[in-house]
Image: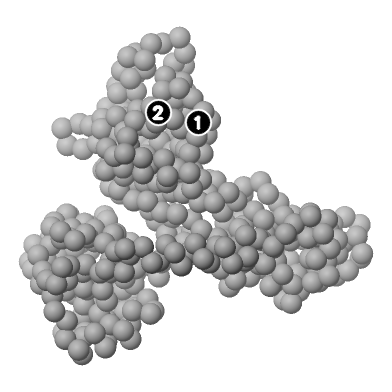
């Protein structure tokens, strides 16, 4: 009897090869995908996705690519230890050209003409670079130059860079300041927490055809988390090995003993995230100057009644109907990722993310606009009141501070208000 027959599975649940069918949409994986989707909505889309080794970046990319429609022309470059000329050749090859034995100026002209031609045919062109942490500074600068190719109306090349955490460090180099300014969204894909790890394991078992999610005993999950740190690739390796141990002993499911036997066979120590060092680093990062200073206050109202009040630090806040947003507005009039707020100590800009029903300030529909303190943003039947609280611009009352203390610990779920007149 084979491994699959023994456990009554249709396919191997914890194989290491990326398979979009097995993607588990944790909150952070959903957010990363939403950021990648924004490259299609936004004319100057440029997104950077980073994550630890084994965090699921490649599987996420494959799932995203599979869902692209015919209006998107996509090139995926995975070999990244290249010179600037070789990178241009690799990109053009992915777009269907044979660009070899060409000088760099000829390659740039070919790419420029291709982009303009696709724009004229109402096509969106997307370049995805995986393992981008291996790109040299010269190639990254070349990518910045490519991102500037535009018609008289808009830029014509959308870009996603995906890579390991070293990519973040590289992009923070003073030499790449101009490139960093071009990036619209940055997201780091971390490890799964205990709850998401359990759901991840059950999801993969279900997709593989398991009749019961108890193929791995519940009391073994803590040990799996302890030795994998919630990293999907490590979870796959340990779970697969534990099931093999159970299969060898003719057991109906993997027990804690099987997990510990697998740990011994793999010669693993507890994951670094559980040794205390990781927590200490997180605590040090949270104490960096300025990490706790908030610059804006958002009051969410429906039919004149306040439903939540929150304050936010500098950065990007996504508003929409999907629960993975920073501000979750549960309403049929609001798109999944409806709009974004980009704020710093100087002020805030609101931008429509290609929503169905639009973003309004007063009677005017806006695509992108700088906000003034007190502006009221209308999304269907909901209103978001923006207040600039940077540098003492807004003195909160004791009542407001008490309310914020109550709601800041949890993400607000804003209920759908009844339609006016019904």
Please name the residue shown 14% across and 72% down the image: 392
The image shows residue 16, relative to residue 282, as above or below, that is above
The image shows residue 300, relative to residue 259, as above or below, that is below
Please name the residue shown 25% across and 69% down the image: 294
Residue topped by disc 2: 139
Left or right: 14, with 50 as reference point: right
> Is residue 214 or residue 230 the one in the foreground?
230
For residue 34, what is the image quadrant? bottom left
Q: Quadrant of the C terminus?
A: bottom left
User: Looking at the picture, how far across and down is residue 275, in whole percent?
Assistant: 63, 65
Left or right: 219, with 103 as reference point: right
The answer to whether any part of residue 258 appears in the image is yes
The answer to whether any part of residue 61 appears in the image is no
> Is residue 264 or residue 298 the one in the foreground?
264
Q: Quadrant of the N terminus?
A: bottom right
User: Looking at the picture, how far across and down is residue 405, in whole percent?
Assistant: 31, 84
Q: How many residues crowd around disc 1 within 10 Å: few (fewer than 14), some, or many (20 or more)?
A: some
Rendered image: mark on residue 412: none
Rendered image: mark on residue 80: 1
For residue 240, what is the image quadrant? bottom right
User: Looking at the picture, how far across and down is residue 261, in whole percent?
Assistant: 84, 63
Number of numbered markers: 2
Q: Earlier in the sequence, mark 1 or mark 2?
A: 1
> Is residue 239 or residue 404 the one in the foreground?
404
Question: Badges 1 and 2: C-beta atoms under 8 Å apart?
Answer: yes
> Is residue 38 or residue 222 the one in the foreground?
222
Name the element at disc 1.
Answer: loop
Q: How many residues crowd around disc 2 within 10 Å: few (fewer than 14), some, or many (20 or more)?
A: many
User: Looking at the picture, how far across and down is residue 320, in whole percent?
Assistant: 31, 67
Please name the residue shown 79% across and 72% down the image: 256
């Amino acid at each position: 009897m084979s491994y699959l027959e023994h456990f009554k599975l249709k396919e191997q649940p914890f194989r290491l090869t990326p398979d979009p069918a097995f993607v588990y949409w944790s909150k952070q994986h959903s957010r990363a995908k939403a950021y990648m989707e924004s490259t299609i909505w936004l004319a100057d889309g440029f997104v950077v996705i980073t994550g630890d080794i084994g965090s699921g970046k490649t599987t996420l990319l494959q799932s995203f690519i599979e869902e692209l429609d015919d209006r998107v022309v996509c090139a995926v470059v995975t070999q990244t230890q290249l010179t600037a000329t070789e990178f241009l050749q690799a990109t053009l090859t992915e777009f269907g050209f044979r660009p070899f034995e060409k000088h760099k100026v000829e390659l740039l002209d070919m790419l420029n003409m291709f982009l303009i031609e696709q724009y004229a045919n109402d096509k969106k062109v997307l370049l995805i670079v995986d393992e981008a942490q291996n790109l040299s500074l010269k190639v990254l600068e070349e990518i910045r130059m490519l991102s500037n190719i535009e018609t008289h109306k808009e830029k014509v090349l959308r870009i996603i860079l995906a890579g390991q955490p070293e990519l973040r460090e590289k992009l923070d180099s003073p030499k790449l300041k101009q490139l960093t300014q071009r990036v619209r969204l940055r997201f780091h894909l971390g490890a799964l927490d205990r709850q998401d790890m359990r759901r991840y394991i059950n999801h993969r078992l279900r997709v593989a055809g398991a009749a019961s999610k108890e193929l791995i005993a519940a009391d073994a999950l803590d040990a799996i988390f302890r030795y994998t740190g919630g990293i999907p690739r490590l979870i796959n390796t340990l779970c697969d090995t534990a099931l093999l141990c159970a299969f060898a002993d003719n057991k109906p499911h993997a027990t804690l003993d099987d997990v510990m036997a697998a740990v011994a066979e793999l010669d693993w120590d507890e994951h670094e995230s559980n040794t205390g060092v990781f927590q200490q680093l997180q605590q040090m990062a949270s104490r960096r100057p300025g990490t706790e200073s908030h610059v804006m206050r958002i009051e969410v109202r429906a039919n004149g009644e306040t439903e939540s009040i929150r304050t936010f630090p500098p950065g990007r806040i996504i508003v929409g109907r999907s629960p993975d947003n920073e501000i979750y507005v549960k309403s049929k009039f609001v798109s999944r990722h409806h709009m974004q707020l980009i704020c710093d100590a100087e002020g805030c800009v609101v931008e429509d993310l290609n929503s169905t029903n639009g973003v309004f300030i007063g009677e005017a529909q806006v695509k992108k606009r700088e906000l003034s303190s007190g502006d009221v943003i209308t999304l269907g039947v909901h209103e978001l009141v923006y207040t600039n609280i940077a540098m003492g611009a807004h003195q909160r009352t004791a009542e407001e501070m008490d309310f914020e203390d109550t709601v800041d610990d949890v993400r607000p779920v804003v209920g759908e208000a009844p339609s006016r007149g019904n």
